[in-house]
Image: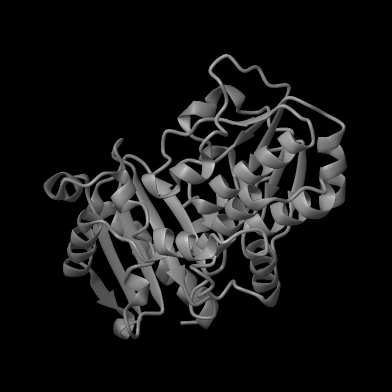
Amino acid sequence: MRVSEAARWLLERDRFLILTHVRPDGDTLGCAAALCRALQKRGKTAWVLENAGVTATYRDYVAGCFAPADYRPEHIVAVDIASEGLLPPEAEAYRGKTELCIDHHPSNEGYAAHLCLDAGAAACGEIVYELCREGLGVMDGEIARALYVAVSTDCGCFAYSNTTPRTHRIAADLMEYGDFAAAVNKRCFQTRSRKRLELEGRLLAGARFTEGGQLALGAVSRRDLAEVGADEGDAEELSSFLRQIEGVRASATLRELPDGTWKLSLRADPDYLNCTAACARLGGGGHAAAAGASVPGVDRAEMERRVYAAIHAQLAAQHGT
């Protein structure tokens, strides 16, 4: 489904509920908030399903968009969700009911009745920007700020390799609608809690470097969080930390979730390691430069073994070694 077709589909219907993914980031939340507000401005009833995983970093950007407890939607829309397995617990009742999915992940499983997919978009926010501005004909300061959050966070403040000229053009247009960019950049990219910094220290201290220093693997356990006094919000943005180290071309960050599941966040130079292909070996997916997977029912040592096996198998496939 093209963006114009998705816009027509939305304009022909009413009473929407918009879903975001588990452990929500700025892209899924920014897209949901922007689409919700754009639909409301077109006279539609639209809300975002509340997600308990929203951290303090992003809470203000989606404020006022969560659905009332007694809301009964007629149409379900998912944004930035590649798989139904990524739905949060709050969305369990809507499993199998998504009518429209708007996404940019090439690994999207096609679970929705209609899929508006642009795998070349740097962020789902780029697609929702086009949908709001051109398809729905709506844009204002609040919508623009939410979309700026969506685009900038998935591009690492425009530093990641997925950033394109189109990304910068979209960001520049959004900035015409309000003086919010500096505040968003400060909050999302230049502010860390002391507990987050302590977690980074532990992650670095326990990291292992292999492949001549090109591959880094580190882990944060529930015990680490408890000893530091950190919460899930402090740990959520650790995925790119080890990738910043000089000489590292691929980083694997493992995080133990409250239910004992280990979550892998893989970041890499795609010409060195295709993250999507490596994570697919563990049942996950994402993008060539950034992907993830979750493995329940294993301890840390077994998780590390599986991650190394997946990475080395993919390195061999890419480089013939």
| Relative height, residue 48 to residue 132 (above, below) | above
Q: For this view, does 180 lie left or right of residue 294?
A: right
Instruction: Please say whether residue 105 is visible from this viewpoint.
Output: no
Q: For this view, does 214 lie left or right of residue 225?
A: right
Q: Which of 278 and 214 is in front in this view?
A: 214
Q: In which quarter of the image is residue 239?
A: bottom left
Q: Nearer the viewer, residue 18 or 36?
A: 36
Q: In which quarter of the image is residue 72?
A: top right
Q: Residue at x 66, y 62 (%)?
A: 174
Q: Residue at x 31, y 35 (%)?
A: 259
State how many labels appear.
0
Instruction: Please say whether residue 317 is visible from this viewpoint.
Output: yes
The x, y position of residue 273, in whole percent, is 49, 74
Q: Which residue is drawn at 69% across and 61% down?
A: 119
Q: Which of 230 and 308 is in front in this view?
A: 230
Q: For this view, does 103 lie left or right of residue 257?
A: right
The single residue placed furthest to the left in the displayed view is 227
The single residue placed furthest to the front in the displayed view is 179
The x, y position of residue 170, in whole percent, is 69, 66
The x, y position of residue 76, in whole percent, is 69, 30
The x, y position of residue 36, in whole percent, is 66, 38
- Colour scheme: one colour
Q: Which residue is drawn at 51% across and 82% down?
A: 319
